Image: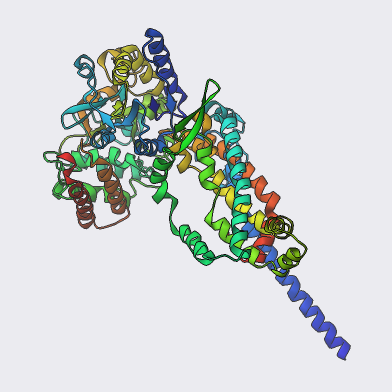
């Protein structure tokens, strides 16, 4: 009798679990479709002429590769915009911002979380306070400021002291290396690593840089991955700043190129082709770091 | 030299040709062109002005000229009157009676329609001499809706930004209102919120409420080309595609008369010289060189815009006597009205857009216009009248 009851209970529980699992799969599939639809629309539309995109937008054909399908939009994108140059610029600028940012901000986070020094709390408070200042409010003063910064120029191979960073790569990179949010995130994450490890290393004769490099950095992989992604996205999407400080087309990043398609009538097919091209690197970076990113979110409780 | 033409190879091709010709014609000055995307161009100019990094030559949209002159971004143009007197009045940018900018072309708006559709529905075809009255226009829209057009008029309300002032303030002016009191340039009171303005905006609100127009279409003229809408309030730049779609059936009609005669917006992209230019004579020399009829005609052909000189009209493929787009020249000559030449225009334009969108969505007409007037007047007084 007891055996029969237990068996029935097991079956009921099993059925409930199965129902829950089916429900969660259906819900996940639904959200996957919701999130994928814009990407599918973008890619499919990139293969259609403008008139068809607008006509198909009134039906489900908007998501299907039907009708007059071709790669013409991609060809026209390359005719209208120097895509390769813009991509190269964005890759260079973004890579340097991310790599230098990881080094500088993690060192700063290390100093704020693990070293004992006077005024540490105040410095951290000031760093965090800068987060509430919107970039747009300081953009014009920053333009003025960078236009007065000293620089070295080479005229006929001879170095010459001059002023002004406008129209350079460095003006698109250096102001964005130090990042308050990254410093805060590193500080928080490093605080979770036991300080006893530092003490043990100190006893073994390690200096602070060795502790940073050989103990803290290897244990903070998820934090580095999160910061890499959170730095990569705004750097890749940068629009207002390069627009204001770069006049030469050969130095522009990809996002400024988006505006090339918005003439009196937007060239929608080319817009979709261009966005497909410039979205690919973002997807690749996110998918590469996805596991570490999710792990960092779970570990630190930080939401990007 | 900075242009707003990045992403517009047809326009850039003409600039390259002019620059090459100019640079080859003399050896004192060299013009180098740098192009920016239009949507971001004004921001780039403002930033460059803040950094003291403006180029000698820059182009600008007509209505922004007084603001940039007032802000001392640009200097008086001082081109020979033999050039500026020959241009369309709306292709010349002025502030305080001085010319600060001049352009190679202008654009014009009209109502596109199909003759077959109007004939089939017994709707009179309006002319420049006898445009539709607002009552006739209402009747036409109601008839076309009853004939099966879900939204008979593509009025372009899905667009944003300067389009709203460019497209709808002429309708307001046709009704007897305006964006500002042009006699003083110091207040919008009475012009933007007077009885004429209220009458027009009530019509505007009703057009959406009645389903005659919608704000959910797509930017451009595709709905008209596909015969999804019967009438389209749009510009010369869409004419070639519509000619291709409708052929001889296409009608280019004057906008309706709201009481004070039809009006269309005037003033397109124009060229000026920055105040900080250290080679202003060279910049002037270049501009003088560039205002040749052959170049103006080429801009017109490549861009499908109205040439700024009568001689270039005849050289152009589309705008001479008997050419398919000639009606736009006549509409421009008869009805074009420049937007108010005041440095307050950017504020007026954005305030107008917000108010018109609110009214379109059902807001109370009088109180919305009163609020807009207050916003504009406050801005003008806080800038000491912008020099007026």
Q: Residue furthest left?
A: B183
Viewer-proximal residue, B23 or B138? B23
Q: Is residue B351 visible?
A: yes
Viewer-proximal residue, A121 or A295? A121
- Residue B258, given in percent of the width and then of the height, sits at 19, 40
- Residue B309, given in percent of the width and then of the height, sits at 26, 17
Residue, x 20% and y 38% (percent of image)? B342
The answer to whether A261 appears left or right of B325 in the picture is right
Q: Judge whether B364 appears above or below B106 on screen.
A: below
Residue, x 48% and y 58% (percent of image)? A131
Viewer-proximal residue, A99 or B333? A99
Q: Is residue A35 visible?
A: no
The answer to whether B178 appears left or right of A88 in the picture is left
The answer to whether B221 appears left or right of A3 in the picture is left
Which of the image's four quarters has the N terminus of chain B? top left
The answer to whether B219 appears left or right of B342 in the picture is right
Looking at the rendering, which quadrant does residue B182 occupy?
Answer: top left
Looking at the rendering, which quadrant does residue A23 occupy?
Answer: bottom right
Q: How many marks?
A: 0
Looking at the rendering, which quadrant does residue B237 occupy?
Answer: top left
Q: Residue furthest bottom?
A: A1
- Residue B20, given in percent of the width and then of the height, sits at 43, 13
């Amino acid at each position: 009798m007891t055996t029969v009851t237990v068996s029935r209970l097991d079956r009921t529980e099993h059925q409930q679990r199965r129902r829950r699992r089916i429900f969660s799969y259906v819900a996940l599939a639904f959200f996957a479709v919701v999130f994928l639809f814009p990407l599918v629309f973008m890619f499919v539309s990139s293969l259609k002429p403008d008139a068809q995109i607008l006509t198909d937008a009134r039906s489900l054909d908007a998501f299907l590769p039907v009708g007059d399908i071709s790669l013409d939009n991609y060809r026209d994108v390359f005719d209208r915009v120097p895509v390769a140059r813009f991509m190269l610029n964005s890759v260079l600028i973004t890579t340097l911002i991310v790599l230098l940012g990881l080094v500088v901000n993690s060192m700063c986070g290390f100093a704020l979380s693990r070293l004992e020094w006077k005024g540490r709390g105040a410095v951290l408070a000031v760093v965090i306070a800068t987060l509430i200042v919107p970039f747009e409010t300081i953009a014009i003063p920053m333009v003025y400021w960078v236009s007065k910064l000293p620089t070295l120029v080479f005229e006929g191979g001879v170095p010459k002291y001059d002023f002004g960073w406008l129209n350079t790569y460095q003006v698109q990179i250096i102001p964005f290396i130090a990042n308050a949010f990254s410093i805060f995130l590193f500080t928080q994450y490093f605080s979770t690593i036991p300080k006893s490890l530092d003490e043990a290393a100190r006893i073994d004769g390690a200096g602070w840089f060795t502790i940073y490099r050989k103990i803290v950095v290897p244990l903070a992989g998820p934090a580095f991955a999160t910061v890499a992604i959170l730095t990569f996205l705004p750097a890749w999407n940068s629009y207002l700043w390069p627009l204001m400080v770069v006049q030469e087309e050969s130095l522009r990043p990809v996002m400024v190129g988006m505006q090339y398609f918005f003439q009196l009538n937007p060239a929608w097919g080319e817009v979709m082709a261009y966005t497909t091209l410039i979205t690919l690197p973002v997807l690749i970076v996110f998918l590469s770091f996805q596991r570490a990113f999710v792990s960092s979110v779970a570990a630190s409780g930080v939401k990007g | 030299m900075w242009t707003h033409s990045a992403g517009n190879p047809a326009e850039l091709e003409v600039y390259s040709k002019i620059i090459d010709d100019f640079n080859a014609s003399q050896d004192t000055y060299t013009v180098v062109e740098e192009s920016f995307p239009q949507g971001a161009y004004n921001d780039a100019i403002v930033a460059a002005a803040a950094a003291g990094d403006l180029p000698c030559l820059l182009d600008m949209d007509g209505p922004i000229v007084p603001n940039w002159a007032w802000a001392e971004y640009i200097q008086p143009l001082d081109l020979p009157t033999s050039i500026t007197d020959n241009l369309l009045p709306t292709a010349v940018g002025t502030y305080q009676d001085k010319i600060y900018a001049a352009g190679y072309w202008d654009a014009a708006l009209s109502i596109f329609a199909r003759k077959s559709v109007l004939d089939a529905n017994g709707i009179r075809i309006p002319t420049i001499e006898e445009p539709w009255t607002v009552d006739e226009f209402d009747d036409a829209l109601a008839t076309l809706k009853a004939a099966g057009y879900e939204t008979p008029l593509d009025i372009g309300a899905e667009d944003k930004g300067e389009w709203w002032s460019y497209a709808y303030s002429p309708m307001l002016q046709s009704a007897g209102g305006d964006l500002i009191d042009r006699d003083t340039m110091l207040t919008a009171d009475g012009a933007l919120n007077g009885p004429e303005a209220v009458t027009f905006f009530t019509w505007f609100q009703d057009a959406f409420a009645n389903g005659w127009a919608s704000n959910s279409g797509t930017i451009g003229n595709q709905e008209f080309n596909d015969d999804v809408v019967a009438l389209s309030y749009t510009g010369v730049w869409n004419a070639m595609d519509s000619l291709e779609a409708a052929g001889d059936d296409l009608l280019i009609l004057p906008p309706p008369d709201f009481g004070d005669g039809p009006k269309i917006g005037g003033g397109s992209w124009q060229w000026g010289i920055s105040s900080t230019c250290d080679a202003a004579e060279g910049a002037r020399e270049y501009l003088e060189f560039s205002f040749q009829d052959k170049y103006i005609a080429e801009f017109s052909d490549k861009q499908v815009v109205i040439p700024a000189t009568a001689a270039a009209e005849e050289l152009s493929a589309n705008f001479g006597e008997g050419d398919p787009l000639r009606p736009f020249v006549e509409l421009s000559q008869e009805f074009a009205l420049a937007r108010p030449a005041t440095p307050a225009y950017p504020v007026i334009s954005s305030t107008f857009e917000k108010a018109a969108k609110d009214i379109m969505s059902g807001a109370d007409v009088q109180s919305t216009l009163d609020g807009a007037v207050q916003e504009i007047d406050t801005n003008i007084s806080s800038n000491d009248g912008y020099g007026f």
